[in-house]
Image: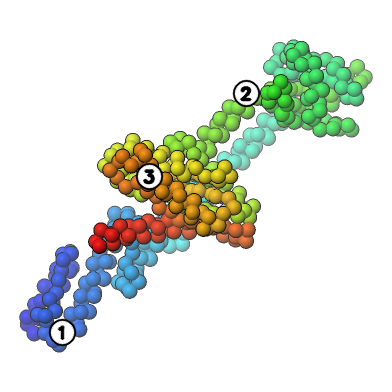
Amino acid sequence: MSATSDLLFAYLREVFYGTQQAELDLEKIDEDYIMFSRALMFFAHCFKQYNNFARALAIGDLSAVPPPPENELAAPLKSLHANLRHLTWQSKQVASGDYKQRIDFMGEFADAFNTMVEQLADRQNKLENEIKQSKKNTKALQQSNLLLSNLTHYIPHQIFVIAAEKHEVLLFNNLAKKEIYKDSDYIHKVMAMLPKYQDMTGSYYNEIRLEQDGKERFLEVSLYFTEWNQINAVALVIDDISTEREKRKELEDKAYHDSLTQMFNRFYGMLTLNDWVDAKKRFALVFVDLDSLKFVNDEHGHTEGDKYIVRVSKHLGEFPPDSVVCRLGGDEFMLLIADVDSDGAHKHMVRVSDEIESDEYLNGKNYNHSISYGIVAVDEGNDMPSSSILSIADERMYEHKRAKKKERRDYTEG
């Protein structure tokens, strides 16, 4: 009995003080304590899993695999792990502009988080209201002063006064004269693009697109109904905004694209996902994660890591034109493939995975280059919000990643 007690006590001490190779020789245990010893060994096994999982959570590793269901000792930690992963996802949603996120766990932290999100939403609303009000004020000011200011020949706008019925030009300024000189049909082309204005009063604003000599021009046209020498007339104030439109398009392209890969960014991807869900579109969402990017950054530098990302994005971009591929950030990508089911999307991804693993540049590197992905097929009857679809695809991606790690481990051990 004394020898058995000493063995059990020594075994427990090794378990609790962190000895990973704690062993208990059952052949040295008194027969009356064999069952107890086996139970103690099972407890030690569960405690080891619990301890490893707790250490991972303590350093913020939320990708750690939780202990199996039979380990009841780790149940509270698994609940915390699930909550932390969900909180991480919610934080990403808030960062992308979804201010509807709330949490109802973690006590005072939940209160602080919810308060922060509410304040961000309030600031966003106030900013949008200020912008709208500013636009209204600007519009009102322009409408009030435009006609008066445009009566001079020295302003950077074209001004025409035209007979309302016959479209005969009654008056024009210097810029308008130059347009007529270059194209005698210019004013008729402009009028043809404007809505019918018979019986209208007051003033109207239009933006039109005009084809001239094979080139596309964009014009802002303001109409003012007036009388000229007892003739019903229309005053047109025209501004060529073609250059501004080009600059605006350049800015929009920059706002919608990732600077490293030149693919669409998270903002554009989420806009498209929401649009497709609202339109009840049939498509597949694929959540993609690069394997081993952290290792590449740590061992080979972030320049090499960026090259890894760019090479993978090149292969991800080889999808049909109606597909949308965007970089969510870091090593995460989202693919929206129109009019395919799960099997079709999987075939696409198997092909892309093979291309990445055989990439000419990456094959010359001494690091693993592959992707993990999760697929969610969405049909016309879908009632899940975008956030749920993305979350499910994220979880399936992690399942794929864990399965590949297990396969590599089993292969190595075999």
Name the disc covering residue 215, or none: none
Q: Quadrant of residue 14?
A: bottom left
- Helix, strand or loop under label 1: helix
Are dots 3 and 1 in contact, CB under 8 Å? no
Q: Which residue is mark 1?
A: 33
Q: Which residue is mark 3?
A: 358
Q: Position of residue 218 (x, y in %)?
A: 69, 26
Left or right: 322 in relation to 96: right
Q: Is residue 28 above or below residue 98?
A: below
Q: Which residue is mark 2?
A: 243
Q: How many residues crowd mark 2 within 10 Å: few (<14), some (14–19), many (20+)?
A: few
Residue 116 appearing in the image? no
Left or right: 24 in relation to 109: left
User: Of label 3 and label 1, which has the lower sequence position?
Assistant: 1
Are dots 1 and 2 in contact, CB under 8 Å? no
**Residue type marked 1:** Tyr
Left or right: 15 in relation to 373: left
**Residue type marked 2:** Thr
In terms of depth relative to the viewer, which is nearer, 332 or 76? 332
Q: Is residue 362 above or below residue 287?
A: above
In terms of depth relative to the viewer, which is nearer, 90 or 3? 3
Q: Between marks 1 and 2, how big is the CA–CA gap?
A: 88 Å
- Helix, strand or loop under label 2: helix
**Residue at x-position 87% and y-position 22%:** 167
In terms of depth relative to the viewer, which is nearer, 232 or 144? 232
Q: Position of residue 227 (x, y in %)?
A: 88, 22
Depth check, mark 3 against mark 2: the one in front is 3
